[in-house]
Amino acid sequence: MASSSYSNAPCAACKFLRRKCMPDCIFAPYFPPEEPQKFANVHKIFGASNVSKLLNEVLPHQREDAVNSLAYEAEARIKDPVYGCVGAISVLQRHVLRLQKELEATNADLMRYACNEMPTSTPQFGRRMGTHEGGSFGQSTSGSYYSSPWNNDPSDQDSQDRAGGDHGNM
């Protein structure tokens, strides 16, 4: 994998540490010379000695995953020194929860529309908020929260009565 780096150029770790890259260098397979920032970040957060000890203790087939994890955590720690990658994970978990709530609300709306029942309350969190293109707060892009393409039959007086007549008021 990195045998060509031995003859051409030292690995990123040896270059950063200003030492000669030996053929048995523990860093060479995982810190190629084309990625100097990867080792610089890992070294800044964990230290070269600690990384070397860790790589020597880990089984050879697990080293690449270990280095990738260290590199990811180091980059996250540089961006967010307090929380590191845990902060990014927390943000993503909260985003997933918001999206799940929005999906549940949208599925509930879909079920009401499919059963030809119209919602009678004001929109709740997550339902067609103003973040969608073309719509304003609480409205779909069709112009009205309560309008539906499959129940716009003018002869269907029930759907007009349930919609409340005035679609603009919330």
Image (cartoon, rainbow, N blue to C red):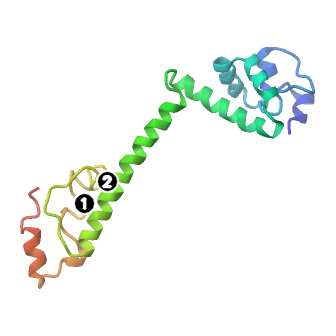
Residue 15 quadrant: top right
Whether tag 2 and tag 1 are in contact, CB under 8 A, the answer is yes
Q: Residue at position x 77%, y 35% from top?
A: 63
Q: Residue at position x 24%, y 77% from top?
A: 150
Tell me where residue 50 appears, x and y as whole percent: 73, 19
Q: Looking at the rendering, in which quadrant would you find the C terminus?
A: bottom left
Say if residue 27 shows up in the picture. no
In the depicted structure, whether residue 31 falls above or below residue 150 = above
**Which of pointers 2 and 1 lies earlier in the amino acid sequence?**
2
Residue projecting furthest to the top: 18
Residue projecting furthest to the bottom: 155
Residue that label 2 marks? 132
In the depicted structure, whether residue 11 falls above or below residue 126 = above
Nearest the camera: 34 or 2? Answer: 2
Residue 55 quadrant: top right
Nearest the camera: 127 or 140? Answer: 127
Q: Residue at position x 31%, y 54% from top?
A: 133
Q: What is the secondary structure assignment of the residue under circle 2? A: loop
Q: Which mark is residue 140?
A: 1
Nearest the camera: 80 or 100? Answer: 100
Q: What is the secondary structure assignment of the residue under circle 1? A: loop
Dot 2 amino acid type:
His
Residue 42 quadrant: top right
Dot 1 amino acid type:
Ser
Tell me where residue 128 appears, x and y as whole percent: 27, 56
Taking 161 as reference, is 117 left or right?
Answer: right
